[in-house]
Image: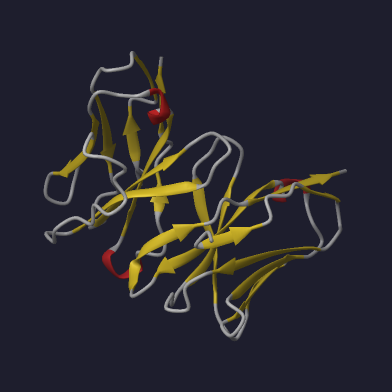
Amino acid sequence: RKEVEQDPGPFNVPEGATVAFNCTYSNSASQSFFWYRQDCRKEPKLLMSVYSSGNEDGRFTAQLNRASQYISLLIRDSKLSDSATYLCVVSAPYNTDKLIFGTGTRLQVFP
Amino acid sequence: GAGVSQSPSNKVTEKGKDVELRCDPISGHTALYWYRQRLGQGLEFLIYFQGNSAPDKSGLPSDRFSAERTGESVSTLTIQRTQQEDSAVYLCASSLAGRTYEQYFGPGTRLTVT
């Protein structure tokens, strides 16, 4: 089983749509969780952290369910510029300095 | 300020040759990471440096891979006797000590082994 699993997509959605991505992680000892964004042929960039209480940043909402080892990202009112690959990232068990990256979910927003 | 830089941006080499990839982290960032990303794949952790601590080499795929870092600055990743399966983009990232979750990535070196 992969340490971090994501649906690779692609998710093709029209502008204005709401889209949700899910991710599961295998080791309950992981303590920190994030979403990174990677544009085509570009380097990854931190999008937001994920907390058990939920975390909202504008149109983006991230949620963590520790019991189910499940992380989600919700994007409301999708923009063309949201088209990218979204990487679910989990800290290594007992080592928050080391990150484990999922393979990503590709989002394509069309006009 | 300047971001993470990597050189070369592209490298084509023949199977069996050695290659050296360079990373210049953001000034003041004590943590430095190397990752490999094969085409259509996710990021694969290779090695991690944090200040003067011993590096975490647990991700290096074989003894053909090695990396060094000079103090808290430049790092080089060396691949000896390259194989075709080494073809990938090699990404370097750096971060502040207390914010290792916020990694700033360089543009990567695209390595092609022919």
Q: Nearer the viewer, residue B53 or A42?
A: B53
Instruction: Give percent across and percent down for residue A59.
Output: 72, 66
User: Does A3 sit above or below residue A66?
Assistant: above
Instruction: Give percent across and percent down for residue B111.
Output: 40, 25
Which corner quadrant of the image does residue B62 belong to? Answer: top left
User: Does A54 sit above or below residue A104?
Assistant: below
Which residue shows up at 54% across the image and 42% down it?
Answer: B41
Q: Nearer the viewer, residue A60 or A92?
A: A92
Q: Is residue B47 left or right of residue A82?
A: left
Instruction: Give percent across and percent down for residue A108.
Output: 76, 45
Which residue shows up at 26% across the image and 33% down it?
Answer: B22
Instruction: Give percent across and percent down for residue B109.
Output: 39, 30
User: Does B52 sit above or below residue B93?
Assistant: below
Which residue shows up at 85% across the image and 51% down it?
Answer: A15
Number of marks in picture:
0
Q: Is residue A73 left or right of residue B13?
A: right
> As drawn, which residue projects farthest toward the front?
A1
Which residue shows up at 69% across the image and 56% down it?
Answer: A7
Q: Is residue A95 left or right of residue B114?
A: left
Which quadrant holds the C terminus of chain B? top left
Which corner quadrant of the image does residue B74 belong to? Answer: top left
